[in-house]
């Protein structure tokens, strides 16, 4: 369309003609501004003097689903002594079973509803000790935290050892199924194949070598430009301008008569304001500097943890608080048969137990439910224990480390899930499969056809627990699970 103005007497005397211009040219030359000025003077006048009153927003807090979910994938598989065992296994304990598991078998202690540890194993001693400087000591830790756990799992030798099961999909995630502020998981050194339903799930990745508060702060922040042009204030100003313009144009585009237009504008505006927090260079450090999280520092001496443990602790806390989704940690070198109990096996078992301690401490501090998943693709069978001296935190102790002599196919290949209930005790959960009385070996339940199904069921159980006992139907649909009762342990 072309617009052309009529000539007046002055144009005729001066022999001037007005060139035709297109509608786009007309708008570019200010027609739109002039029209808006005439149509919406109050809004624009308020823009000249400051913010438009109509653009003031009341943004709800970011939707967060409290509740922590974390996973360890122990590549290769430790002995049974490196983990919790069930009450049924403890009930049939004899010298042969204990030797195969790599525990003494005479120092068993029930924790929470249905989990048992050997208190003299590297794993058990670490769990019992708790975080460094816990107010009230280890006894208080056991009373206030360990009494509130329970466990469940799908037992059985689903995968072969020596790496044969490494890429069968034993890694998952929850970013798509949990409402969080940032909408993604944290993956630490994850390199093997994800479960089919978790492939491409929203996540930020970091290596174990880079796992520090500073590394996570950078990972979850938007770095402002060096010249300081991109700042939290500049993002706020830009958000204000965008919202004011939207308000000024609302009558022009008839927002009041369009279904959902106002809601869309408000949602977009609140999202823009959210960017201001992300651009703040202190945003990431405020989340992942564990020593700066008062809820944690009030409970124990956070500074006594290693740098990596502090980062892991803060990550678990932000999962429990609903800032991020799940935290998935892959640990290599767990196929440790034939390795030295003092220098290899005990340190590996302690490291994994410390991760669980950090998780439980974060859940307790956040007063939130938690689900900790523990998968491996194999298991080492032991031939008893060997006394070793190890330092757990700041405490040196003599403990009974497994003597791992070969591969066993696994009794927990498909996984274990540990539940934490801040109100205590942990929820009623079950273990599938049966245990051979003569050896302690596990046989898979007929309802569990594969490790993929078991992994899906344990993730569904984890989500159900933090969702207040509601079946996670969206996740079940994504995982293509038809019968939840076959695969869940809650």
Image (cartoon, helix red, strand yellow):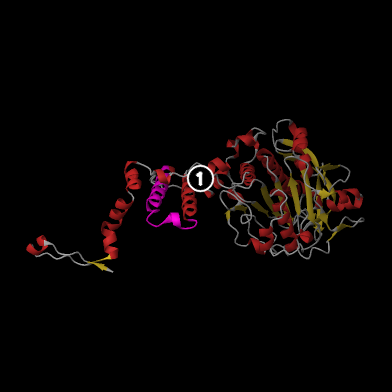
Q: Secondary structure at mark 1?
A: loop
User: Percent x, y for residue 149?
Assistant: 77, 44
Quadrant position of residue 472: bottom right
The dominant secondary structure in magenta is helix
Q: Which residues are magenta?
A: 233-260
Q: How many marks?
A: 1
* 287 is higher (above) or lower (below) than 8: above
Q: Is residue 125 above or below residue 372?
A: above
Q: Residue furthest left?
A: 13
Q: Report whether 209 appears left or right of 413.
A: left
Q: Is residue 261 left or right of residue 477?
A: left
Image quadrant in which you'd find residue 125: top right
From the viewer's side, name the closer residue of 457 and 203.
457
- Of residue 488 and residue 42, the one placed in the foreground of this image is 42
Query: Residue 177: x and y, percent?
Result: 64, 55
Does the magenta run of residues contain 478?
no
């Amino acid at each position: 369309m072309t617009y052309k103005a009529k000539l007046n007497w002055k144009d005729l005397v001066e022999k001037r003609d007005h060139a035709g211009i297109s509608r786009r040219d007309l708008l570019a030359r200010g027609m739109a501004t002039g029209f808006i000025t005439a149509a919406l003077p109050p809004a624009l006048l308020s823009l000249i003097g400051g913010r438009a009153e109509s653009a003031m927003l009341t943004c709800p807090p970011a939707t967060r689903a409290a509740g922590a979910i974390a996973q360890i994938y122990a590549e290769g598989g430790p002995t049974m002594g490196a983990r919790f065992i069930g009450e049924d296994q403890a009930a049939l304990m004899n010298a042969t079973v204990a030797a195969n598991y790599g525990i003494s078998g005479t120092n068993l202690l029930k924790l929470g509803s249905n989990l048992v540890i050997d208190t003299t194993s590297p794993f058990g001693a670490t769990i019992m000790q708790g975080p460094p400087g816990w107010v009230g000591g280890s006894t208080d830790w056991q009373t206030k935290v360990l009494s509130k756990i329970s466990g469940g799992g799908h037992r059985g030798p689903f995968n072969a050892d020596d790496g044969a099961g490494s890429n069968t999909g034993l890694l998952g995630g929850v970013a798509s199924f949990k409402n969080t502020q940032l909408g993604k998981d944290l993956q630490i050194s994850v390199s093997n194949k994800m479960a089919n339903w978790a492939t491409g799930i929203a996540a930020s990745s970091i290596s174990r070598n880079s796992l520090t508060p500073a590394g996570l702060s950078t990972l979850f922040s938007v770095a402002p430009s060096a010249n300081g042009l991109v700042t939290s204030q500049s993002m706020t100003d830009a958000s204000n301008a965008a919202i004011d313009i939207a308000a000024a144009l609302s009558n022009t585009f008839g927002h009041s008569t369009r279904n959902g237009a106002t809601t869309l504008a408000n949602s977009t505006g609140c999202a823009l304001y959210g960017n201001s927090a992300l651009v703040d260079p202190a945003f990431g450090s405020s989340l992942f500097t564990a020593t700066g999280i008062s809820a944690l520092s009030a409970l124990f001496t956070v500074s006594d943890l290693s740098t990596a443990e502090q980062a892991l602790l803060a990550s678990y806390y932000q999962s429990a608080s609903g800032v991020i989704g799940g935290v998935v940690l892959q640990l290599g070198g767990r196929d440790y048969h034939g390795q030295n109990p003092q220098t290899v096996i005990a340190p590996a078992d302690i490291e994994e137990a410390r991760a669980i301690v950090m998780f439980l401490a974060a859940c307790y501090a956040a007063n939130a439910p938690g689900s900790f998943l523990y998968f491996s693709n194999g298991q080492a069978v032991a031939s008893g224990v060997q006394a070793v001296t190890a330092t757990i935190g700041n405490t040196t102790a003599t403990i009974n480390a497994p003597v791992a002599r070969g591969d066993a196919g696994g009794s927990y290949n498909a996984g274990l899930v540990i539940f934490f209930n801040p109100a205590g005790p942990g929820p009623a959960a079950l273990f599938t499969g049966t245990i051979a009385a003569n050896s302690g070996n596990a046989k898979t339940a007929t309802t569990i056809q594969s490790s993929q199904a078991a992994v899906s069921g344990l993730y569904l159980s984890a989500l159900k627990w933090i969702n207040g006992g509601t079946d996670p139907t969206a996740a079940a649909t994504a995982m293509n699970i038809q019968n939840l009762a076959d695969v869940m342990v809650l």
